[in-house]
Amino acid sequence: MLTHPAWDSPGLRHGFLDGRESAGATWDRVLAGIGAPLPILVPRQVHGTDVVEALPGDAPRADGLVAARRGLLVGIVTADCVPVLLVDRRRRVAAAVHAGWRGAATGVLESAVECLGRTAGTPAADVEAAVGPAVGGCCYEVGPEVLEAFRARSGDVTVPAWSERGGRRHVDLRVAASLLLAAAGVPSVEVLGPCTACDRRYHSYRRDGAGTGRQLSFVGWA
């Protein structure tokens, strides 16, 4: 499990679970085993931009959840897409966001920052972000429609995330997410972990196809 070393705050529970820890077990059992025995809510992810407040017993169609109350974890699952955890330590609220290329290009990260503002009064300047393991520029070759989608909404913000090899475009979604969060006013963004397609400890849709497993990324306050 990866954690953000700087997020050593009383009551804060968070982590990025790799495939070895998640395989063959329910999320609740895995979380209890690592010392975070809190109920967890995971949305029905649709590669969109909706981010909503988590309510006990609810599993909304969304790509991000905000935990605005204690005693509840929110999480998302990924297998190459970017998991992003957001925290406002002052107000003790947090969010978990699933950012595939479609969601990132069309504003899911900005939606998460805005949702923290609506639900808890959190300004972007008080948000800290951790970007977890996802497919890197080394492995993620994409078509021109992906670059066009990013440019259509954010212009040249993500330019440093792009590279070209043998006339083909590659994008590092982790870098793109970091740049978009910074542009949204988030002052502290850290990238944790390797490329999921390179590192076989992680499940990877691009490497292994639709039958691969999933990683769990979670956050919340006890």
Image: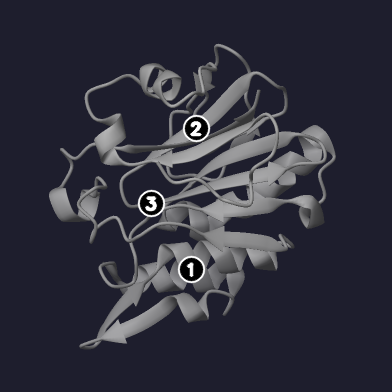
Residue type highlighted by circle 1: Val
Mark positioned earlier in the residue sequence (2 or 3):
2
Mark positioned earlier in the residue sequence (1 or 3):
3
Residue type highlighted by circle 3: Cys
* Disc on res. 116: none
> Distance from label 1 to label 3 (Cα)?
12 Å
* Residue under the point 33% across and 42% down: 18
Mark positioned earlier in the residue sequence (1 or 2):
2
Determine whether, in the image, residue 158 is placed left or right of residue 145.
Answer: right
Q: Residue 23 location, x and y as percent?
A: 24, 30
In terms of secondary structure, where does tag 2 sit?
strand
Residue matched to label 1: 175
Residue matched to label 3: 81
**Which sits in the foreground, 12 or 183?**
12
> Distance from label 1 to label 2 (Cα)?
21 Å
Q: Residue furthest bottom?
A: 166
Question: In this picture, is 190 found above or below 121?
Answer: below
Q: Quadrant of residue 207?
A: bottom left
Residue matched to label 2: 75
In terms of secondary structure, where does tag 3 sit?
loop
**Which sits in the foreground, 196 or 99?**
196
Determine whether, in the image, residue 152 is placed left or right of residue 145.
Answer: right
Q: Residue 113 location, x and y as percent?
A: 70, 49
Dot 3: few (<14), some (14–19), or many (≥20) neighbours within 10 Å?
A: many
Quarter holding the C terminus is: top right
